[in-house]
């Protein structure tokens, strides 16, 4: 059985858990307990461990989705998770510009560590005060070749589109 | 759809960069406690700014002796007769009440000082209304103002080292031009020490190297380069790590994956 891995990252409350939950064939493995830090003011439950999801491609191939912990104290996990990953989805909460700086830090970490195929998912595009993907691209100062895509993590079709776009980027770097 | 946020988290310089690169037209509303400000942009350039509630730039022109109350009334009447298509600025110029240069200079100085004052706000709610245009009865600058110089000046006024460190975490990073700077650099006015740094950017030297070659402090070089970055002229990248020696340890290479395998995953996800 061959396994391949994609990492879903982003600042706290960017929508990582929901993203994986929308597409995973198994119940997302996450620890749901009330956080003891400031994140409890943002949402009622928050994960304090990694999210893990799975998609069976065939009998001999499985795609694993790993969500990075959002809190800064778990940053050490990024290096471990990035080992052997195919590509990265960076989720951004389009309604909270105060998280853009943290998002840049995440992108800088993963892309400085090694050559990384990644896309940016501008999540929560269904909210009225969401910044559009083009505006996010400028705010995050991303070059034109990086895909910044609209996303609603609770919608399966939207999540599928993000993963497919990442796979197209990976395809360009793969070998015959 | 309005862009909303707080300049504590997304600075005014960053927002001006977004407006410039996005060729935005609209109005940026800023508020902090009792203070309010509005900035109007047209295709990424600034055309009007007001800091105080009810401030009327027409009255500013009278206070500065540029025109009399009668002349302002004359221009406003011409504006009313022209319907919504004639702005006060056009009426002032058409009626030869003020020259283009005189009007531009007066409004530009006021506008620039209004914006520079905003860079001192440590926080403040912002809301950008796309497409919103100023009242035709207010005098806008005849020639819209590019924002690059506003950004550079705003950065000069930043004294928060922490904000610079966010973008430049180490002086061991290489500075390089984002694109050929020719066109963008034309609109930017630099101080002599800024030119010294600008001339040393070659895509190979680090900030520390530039500090050594220019005899400036590393802090000053970082501050100057931060200004260039905010204006969209340069970016910084980490020094490439030396290639690992064979057998020395685990190489951090992305796994080489075959197209056939990627295709299988694509087909699976499409079918979900």
Image: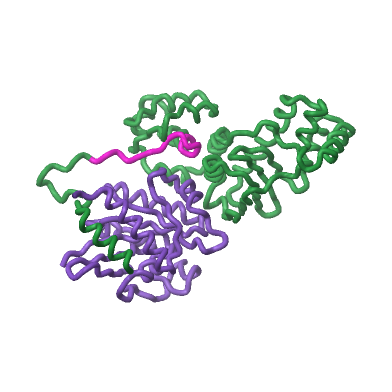
Chain colours: A purple, B green
Extreme left residue here?
B247
Q: Position of residue A120 (x, y in %)?
A: 40, 54
In the foreground, B172 or A175: A175
Image quarter of the C terminus of chain B: bottom left
Is residue A37 highlighted in magenta? no
In the foreground, A173 or B248: A173
| Residue located 12% across and 46% down the image | B248
Q: Which region is colored magenta?
A: B227-241
Image quarter of the N terminus of chain B: bottom right
In the foreground, B208 or A158: A158
Q: Position of residue B44 (x, y in %)?
A: 58, 40
Quadrant location of residue B211? top left
Q: Is residue B93 left or right of residue A149?
A: right
| Residue located 42% across and 46% down the image | A142
| Residue located 67% across and 48% down the image | B132
In the foreground, B205 or B130: B130
Please, is residue B65 above or below residue A111 in the view?
Answer: above
Quadrant location of residue A51? bottom left
Quadrant location of residue B225? top left
Q: Position of residue A69 (x, y in %)?
A: 35, 64
Q: Position of residue B119 (x, y in %)?
A: 59, 42
Extreme right residue here?
B70
Please, is residue B111 above or below residue A11 in the view?
Answer: above
Q: How many marks?
A: 0
Is residue B228 highlighted in magenta? yes
| Residue located 57% across and 45% down the image | B12
């Amino acid at each position: 059985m061959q396994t391949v891995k994609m990492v879903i990252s982003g600042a706290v409350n960017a929508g990582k858990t929901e993203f994986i939950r929308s597409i995973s064939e198994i119940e997302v493995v996450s620890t749901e307990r009330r956080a003891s830090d400031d994140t409890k003011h943002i949402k009622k439950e928050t994960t304090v461990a990694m999210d893990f999801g799975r998609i069976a491609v065939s009998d001999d191939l499985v795609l694993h989705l790993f969500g990075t912990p959002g809190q800064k104290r778990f940053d050490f996990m990024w290096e471990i998770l990035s080992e052997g990953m195919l590509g990265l989805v960076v989720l951004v909460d389009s309604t909270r510009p105060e998280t853009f700086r943290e998002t840049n830090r995440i992108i800088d970490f993963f892309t400085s560590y090694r050559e990384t195929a990644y896309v940016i998912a501008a999540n929560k595009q269904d909210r009225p005060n969401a910044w559009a993907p083009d505006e996010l691209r400028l705010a995050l100062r991303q070059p034109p070749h990086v895909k910044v895509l609209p996303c609603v993590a609770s919608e399966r079709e939207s999540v599928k589109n993000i993963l497919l776009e990442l796979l197209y980027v990976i395809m360009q770097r793969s070998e015959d | 759809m309005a862009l909303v946020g707080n300049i504590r988290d997304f600075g005014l310089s960053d927002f001006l960069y977004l407006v410039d690169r996005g060729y935005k037209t609209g109005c940026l509303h800023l508020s902090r406690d009792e203070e309010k400000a509005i900035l109007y942009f047209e295709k990424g350039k600034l055309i009007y700014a007001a800091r105080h509630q009810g401030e009327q730039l027409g009255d500013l022109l009278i206070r500065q002796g540029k025109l009399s109350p009668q002349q302002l009334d004359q221009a406003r009447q011409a504006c009313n007769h022209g319907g919504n298509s004639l702005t006060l600025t056009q009426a002032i110029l058409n009626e030869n009440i003020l020259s283009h240069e005189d009007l531009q200079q007066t409004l530009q100085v006021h506008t620039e000082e209004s914006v520079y004052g905003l860079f001192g706000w440590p926080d403040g709610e912002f809301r950008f209304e796309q497409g919103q245009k100023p009242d035709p009865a207010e005098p806008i600058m005849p020639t819209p103002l590019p924002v690059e110089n506003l950004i550079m000046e705003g950065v000069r006024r930043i004294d928060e080292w922490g904000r610079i460190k966010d973008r430049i975490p180490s002086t061991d990073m290489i500075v390089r031009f984002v694109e050929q700077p020719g066109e963008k650099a034309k609109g930017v006015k630099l101080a002599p020490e800024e030119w010294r740094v600008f001339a040393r950017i070659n895509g190979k030297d680090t900030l520390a190297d530039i500090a050594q070659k220019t005899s400036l402090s590393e802090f000053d070089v970082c501050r100057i380069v931060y200004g260039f970055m905010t204006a969209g002229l340069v970016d910084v990248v980490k020094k490439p790590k030396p290639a690992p020696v064979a057998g020395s340890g685990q190489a951090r290479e992305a796994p080489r994956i075959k197209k056939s395998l990627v295709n299988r995953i694509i087909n699976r996800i499409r079918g979900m």
